[in-house]
Amino acid sequence: MILIFIMWPLVLFSQNSFRFAGNNAKVEIPFELVNNLIILQVKINDVPLKLIFDTGIKQTILINLKSTDSIHLKGLQTKKFAGIGKDNLSIEGLSSTHNKINLDNKLQNTNAKVYIITGVDFHFSESIGININGFIGGELIKDFLVKIDYKRKKLVFYEPNRFNYKKLRRLHQYALEIINDKPYIRAFIKIHKKAPRIDSLKFLIDTGNSDALWILNKTKLQMPSEQKTVNDYFGLGFSGAIKGQRAKSYRFGFDKKIKFKHIYVALPDSIYFKHIVAQNPFDGLIGNEILRRFYVWLDYKNKKLYLKKYGRNYRQPFLFNDTGLYLAYEGKIPVEVKKLVSQFNTTNEGGRIKVFQEESYIYEYKMVDRIVINYIRKDSPADRAGLMAGDILLKINNEDVYQYRLDQLEKKFFFHNREHLTFLIKRKGLILSFNVFNKKQL
C-alpha cells in the first residue's frame, strides 16, 4: 500500500510553534514504522491519536475521528481544502484554534491550529492496517534540527542554538528549498540507458509517501520507445484510487556519492496533480522507500539536508509488487483455531495414586480482521490467474493470513526468485485456490 496525502487549505495559515516541555538540548520521540510510514502517538487536548508524520503537508490534519468522538476542539470554523483528485474540487472541513498538541510529554504546542476534513470518507486505516487519525506536518519540525532514525525508530529533535554542527561535517550535505514549511531538493534522473540524464529536477521530500520516487511531469523524462512500463495503482486521493504507470529507472541521485540504480518510478496520471503543481511547480516526490536507507537530518532554519548511509537498508534492492495485488481490511471473519489442551487425571492401582497427563486438540472459533483484495493491476500475474477485487484472502502458500499485518503480507508479493505464489480465497461462499506465476514485467 502506498499512501500519498498532499493538501492545501484555501485559506492562510497562522504560525504554530512547538517547544520542548523542559530545558532540554534534545528530545527523542519514538515512532512506529508501518508500511514505510512514520506513525507518531500524539495527544491533542489530552486525547491520544495516531498521526502520520508527513513533510508533504504543513499543518496538523485530522481525517478519522470516529473512534475518538470525545475530543474537544475549540474555535471551530468552516474551511475548504484542495488536494489530489481528478477534478479541481474543494473539500469541506473545519479549522480549530487554541489546541494543545503533546508528544510523549517532551514536545508540545500549547496554541495549535488543527484542521479537520469532514467532506470525504477516507479509508486509509483499512489500507494500512492500523487506525490512523490524521497527519502532522512541517510545523512540527520547522524550529528544530530533526534526525529521522529509521534504525531505532525515533525522531530526535535538537535545539539548533545548542547543537554542535561540527558533528555533521562528514555527512553528505544538500541544499533545501523550504516553501510553506515543506522541503524541496534538487536531484537528477536517467530513466533509461538510452535516455538523456535530466539534471536539477525539483523534488518534494515527502515522508507521507511510502513509495520511493514519483515523477509528476513525464514529458521531462524523454523516455525512449524501449522503456517498459506497466499500469499501476499508487494510493488514495479525494477522487479515489490514484493510477498511472510504473517504470524502472536506470539511475537516480543527488550527486556522484549518493545515487541509485534501478529504482521503480511511479508516473501518476497528470490529471491528479495538475492543480497542486500549478500553485507551486515541482517535478516529483521522494518517499520513505529512499529515505529509510539513510539517517536523515532535516534543518529547515538553515535549509539543509544531511544524509548518512544506513548500511543495512542502503544495500537492499528496490522491489516491485510483482503480483499486482493490493489488500485492505474489511470487517471481521470467524476462523477455526486448533488448540492443544492438557488435562491431569489420576488412577488408583493397588492403593497407589498415579497422576498422568492427557493431551488433546480442540477447535475454537475466534474473530479476526477480514483481509480482502482491494485492487488488482490490470494484466498483472494476479489478474491473469483469475483473482478478483473483493476476494477474501485466507492463506498464502498454506500460511493463514490472519497471523500477519497487511504490510507483512504485501511483502510476500515480491516474487524475488520464486516461480509462483499460491492463494486460498473465499468468493461468494466458495473456497478457491489460485497459483499466481512470476512473469517479469519491468
Image: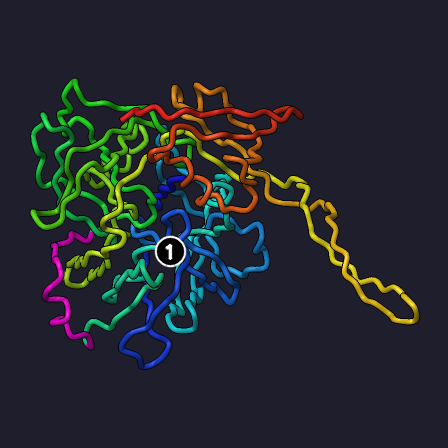
Residue furthest bottom in the image: 23
Which image quarter: residue 436? top left
* Residue 47 locus on image (x, y percent): 52, 63
- The residue lying at 38 percent from left, 32 percent from top is 418
- The residue lying at 51 percent from left, 30 percent from top is 423
Q: Quick check: 244 left or right of 166? A: right
Magenta highlight range: 162-178
Q: Which residue is nearer to you in this view: 357 or 124?
A: 357
- The magenta stretch spans residue 152: no
Q: Which residue is nearer to you in this view: 205 or 406?
A: 406
Residue pointed to by mark 1: 136
Q: Looking at the rendering, in which quadrant would you find the N terminus?
A: top left
- The residue lying at 49 percent from left, 30 percent from top is 422
- The magenta stretch spans residue 163: yes
Q: Is residue 267 visible?
A: yes
Q: Which residue is nearer to you in this view: 37 or 151?
A: 151
> Given the image, on which type of amino acid does mark 1 rest?
Ile
Q: Looking at the rendering, in which quadrant would you find the C terminus?
A: top left
Mark 1 burial class by Cα count in 10 Å: few <14, some 14-19, many 20+: many
* Residue 385 locus on image (x, y percent): 46, 20
Residue furthest front in the image: 350
Question: How many marks do you count on the picture?
Answer: 1
Q: Tag 1, which secondary structure? A: strand
- Above-or-below relation of 79 to 142: above
Q: Quick check: 205 left or right of 331? A: left
Which image quarter: residue 112? bottom left
* Residue 381 locus on image (x, y percent): 40, 23
